[in-house]
Amino acid sequence: MLANLGIAVTKFIAYLLSQSTSMLAESVHSLADTGNQILLLIGGRGARRAPTPEHPFGFGRERYVSAFVVSIVLFSLGGLFAVYEGIGKIAKPHPMESWWLPVAVLLVSMVMEALSLRTALKESRPARGGAGIIAFVRRAKAPELPVVLLEDTAALCGLAFALLGVVLTVVTGNGVWDGLGTVAIGVLLIAVALLLGAETRSLLIGEGASTAGLERIRQAALDGEGVDRIIHMRTLYLGPDELLVAMKIAVAPQRTACDVAGIIDALEQRVREAAPIVTLMFVEPDIDRAAEDESAAH
């Protein structure tokens, strides 16, 4: 976080000395990244609060709220600002001063961002499996790693756009290239913000377990004695590490209340062993009408 803030200040100084709008866009980008890290920290702390009567299921989704706000910050502070400044530079291009300074800052920043992205990719490998960054972002339930991956990828691409714009401006003497580089940075940030916003919106609305997760829960529920079938089942992520499961099961008509209570207790234990992420579970028993009709027929 402090490193990002330091990079933002360095880029802004380079902008003041060179008047490169690409450097201004990149300094705002780094400042937005710093704010985003603060937001994610706040969301992580808030999510650990104990449930209250007003919020009986806890505050796990606060991490999703923080990630959604991050997308808004990237879109407005980063993307729209960069596009605005870039269009202004294209309309009124001016020569670049002290061109070596932004080039040096951009090259050093690219090395630092590449190292940061490599670290993020390494840390996310167990969670990603063999999936790419976009696929991982779309399926991940914990927002922190996807946000970091997207930010680092966008930062590296943005630096490349800025460097290209600065170099072309120096070579051609035409400041329009600097403006085009700035617009490219803005469009990139807007695209990343929209992707992140769409995914966190889905999590805020409420996502259920994956197909594999549902099958694992279903098999665990049916493996024990007394559960004839699952009539229906619903799941909902209350937070990245909290899954609510509600199901209605069919039991034989001759089962007593004590039998049913034991069946439900055993079922819940099996499900939690198969899927430790299940923190809340509600099981409603019902008479197996199919079995009852079959018995009546005989």
Image (tube, rainbow, N blue to C red):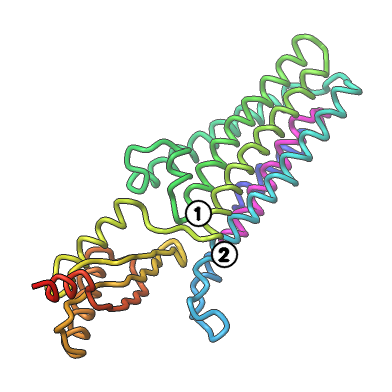
Give the number of the disc on residue 43. Answer: 2
Amino acid type indicated by mark 1: Pro
The residue lying toward the viewer, choosing from 88 and 210, is: 210
Element type at mark 1: loop
- Quick one: label 1 or label 2, which is nearer the N terminus? 2
Q: Which span is picked out in magenta?
A: 16-43
Instruction: Give the camera-side residue of 138 and 178.
Output: 138
Q: Position of residue 219 (x, y in %)?
A: 20, 60
* Residue 23 spot, x, y in % from top left: 74, 32
The x and y percentages for residue 160 are 62, 25
Mark 2 secondary-structure assignment = helix
Classify 10 Å Cα crowding around label 2: few (below 14), some (14-19), many (20 and above). many
Toward the left, the furthest residue is: 298
Relative side of 244 to 107, left or right: left
Q: Measuring 64% from the left and 36% from the top, which residue is drawn there?
A: 191
Residue, disc 1: 143
Q: Residue at x 54, y 31 (%)?
A: 111
Q: Is residue 263 above or below residue 125?
A: below
Dot label at residue 204: none
Does 39 appear in magenta? yes
Magenta stretch, main secondary structure class? helix
Q: Quadrant of residue 75?
A: top right
Spatial separation of the CA atoms under disc 1 and disc 2: 10 Å
